[in-house]
Image (cartoon, coloured by chain):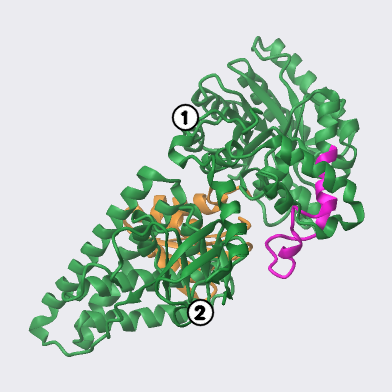
Amino acid sequence: MTLALTGHGAADGIAIGRVHLAERNEAEIGEYRISESGVEKEISRFRDAVSRASEELRELGEKLTAETSSTASEIIASHIVMLHDSSFGHSIDSRIREELCNAEWALQAQLEKILAEFRQIDDPYIRSRGEDVAHVVSLVQHNLDDESSSQALNSIPDRLADTLVVASELTPGELAALHQRGVAGIITEHGSTYSHTAIMAGSLDIPAVLGVRQARELLNEGENLVLDGRMGLVYANPNKALLKHYRDAHRRSARHRTSLRAIREVPSQSRDEISVSLQANAERIDEIELAMRDGAESVGLFRTEFLFLAPGVPGENEQYAAYSEALKTLAGKTLTIRTLDLGADKSSPGESLGHPAETANPALGLRAVRLCLRDTEMFKTQLRAILRTSAEGPVRCLIPMLTTIQEVRMVRALINECCQELRDRGLDFDPDMPLGGMIEVPAAALAAAELARHLDFLSVGTNDLLQYTLAADRVDEQVAHLYDPRHPGVIQLLKMIVVAGKARGIPVTVCGELAGDKRYIRLLLALGIREFSMHANRLLQVKQVITNTHVGHAEQVFEQWQEGHAEAYDLDLLEMIDSSQ
Amino acid sequence: MIEITTTIINRLGLHARAASLLVNCASEFQSEIWLKVDERRVNGKSIMGVLTLAASQGTAITIQAEGDDEAEAANAVKQLIDRRFNEDE
């Protein structure tokens, strides 16, 4: 009989294999008194345990950096920072001194105090960080216990290929260790989607389902299991049909998979040899360097707000120096500079730009290019700095929050004035510097065909475009579920922008978070997007999806879906595209 | 002792990544650094302490520093917060 269990799908992917039930060494936290003369020794014992725990994590972290993307090793690094938290260390020392108790007891008491504080926090993401404190403390507890084996988890076989480990919960460190042994998938009874364990599983590509109640009671050692990470489903003793369905799905996704590290060397091309441009969003030199290392073709979005955060307005030379440095770092690749995208509202330092602070609705107010066209002195200073930079290498200028054609005309007029001013000063610039617009206002998206006639390229700011179009704040828990790129309205809007760009023969780049989200890459490719700009740490993952996609098939599916019309909302377009691959 | 007040302006507030950046920054200075939100005061060099502040966007935060490099320290922390911890929004 097939048994189906549900939980939170913490990491995508399908795993097929046999169950291994992991037992945890639940050491009892004993309490005993120590003598006054024994205090220093006890404190040393605690500090030694911290050192050993730190060493364990450091080794794990090193192995991770060598193989995979940065997220997993960042999580381990954050645990090491917690381990060395000075306030925490001092509080343990104090407890040992004042209460004359053993280190284990001091740790437990302090942990409980901290967890109580975390439980008060509203924000679920920060509240989950309490789990990290618990994980770190348990690692120290483990190192204090001389008698336990070197693993907190008992009896884990060395080779875990084709094995799915089932545990009450797993710390990121333990997960990393399982990864080393080639584990196929994991199931835990506890844990939330915000937990670092979930994030780590995603980053290490280990299919995972968390929060499966009583998993260890309901599943049997050695039993056959199918795990569907995307849906959060676990099937024990799957019947033939189920097994075949999942084996096929697994084979389709595994077929052309290359490891993340090897992906660096591979050209950015789909399975049917369509070239896709991968670019980076950046504002710091180190981000640009990372982007270069991971194969970005160019910087598709260089944010300039950082220059405007201090009180007052940055001068032309100061801005020119910053843009110039960024361009130099790119060593010949193109730098797309976005003009100021700040508002005049209270929550942003735009206030220091001397404009009224009270705005009822900042997202709909005097921001970005609107603000710049009001304060042309400031805007022209920035434009001149950008133009001067264009003399030194390939530079494009990008205007945020474009709404009307008049705005484009005004910007071009101001650029022409700036060109003349620079000529008068005997300074060089590129007279053909491309000017593009960020399409993020829905009206602009609907009128993209018109706007495209006046621009050299289009960039789709999906973050704001989706928020304005769906009228939902993605950070507001109560409505964040509405922020869904699969809404047919959103898909049609994106398609309009692509069509507009094609009609004029100008590039269309997606540069919002969607561009770096591996779940939606195939969808964007199916719509006709061929340029993606993302945070540098996403480049390899996105390239991996691209090299594993047959764009032609995806596009066919999209056409069929479009013709579906009325039923469109019910059909999961993403699944249809995946099945076509 | 020096005291400066500023506002958390980035969208996600003082979440985990921002907290780490802040603690890293504070830890480079010799002075003692404290962060105050309403009545709560935590050690600016303690990641656990800073995390529990859970200061969201729009929260006023006071930076207190005491020591030889107190002015630099307080300013550095303020800059980091004002620069939105180098985040998008």
In this rendering, position of residue A48 left or right of residue A201: left
Res A366 seen here: yes
Disc 2 chain ID:
A
Name the residue: 52% across, 39% down. Answer: A540
| Figure check: B7 above or below A293 | below
Quadrant location of the C terminus of chain A? top right
Give percent across and percent down for residue A10: 55, 63
Locate residue A3, reporting x and y percent: 57, 76
Chain B rendering hue: orange
Q: Chain of mark 1?
A: A
Q: Which residues are magenta?
A: A469-496
The correct choice, above or below, for B87 with respect to A116 in the image is above
Lateral position of residue A477 relative to residue B48, left or right: right
- Using a 10 Å C-alpha cutoff, classify the residue at mark 1 as few (fewer than 14 neighbours), some (14 to 19) or many (20 or more): few
| Label 2 sits on residue | A119
Residue under the image location 56 percent in, 48 percent down: A251
Q: In the displayed structure, would residue A289 be above or below residue A384?
A: below
Q: Nearer the viewer, residue A303 or A8?
A: A8
* Residue A427 magenta-highlighted: no
Disc marking residue A265: 1
- Residue B65 appears left or right of A483: left
Note the chain letter of the green one.
A
Q: Which mark is residue B11?
A: none
Image location of residue B12, percent across then percent down? 60, 59
Which dot, 2 or 1, sits closer to the camera? 1
Disc 2 residue type (three-letter): Arg
Q: Quadrant of the N terminus of chain A?
A: bottom right
Residue B70 visible in the current orientation: no
Describe residue A428's horizontal placement relative to residue A456 as left or right: left
Residue at horizontal 22 percent and vertical 79 percent from the top: A103
**Secondary structure state at the residue bearing disc 2:** helix
Q: Earlier in the sequence, mark 2 or mark 1?
A: 2
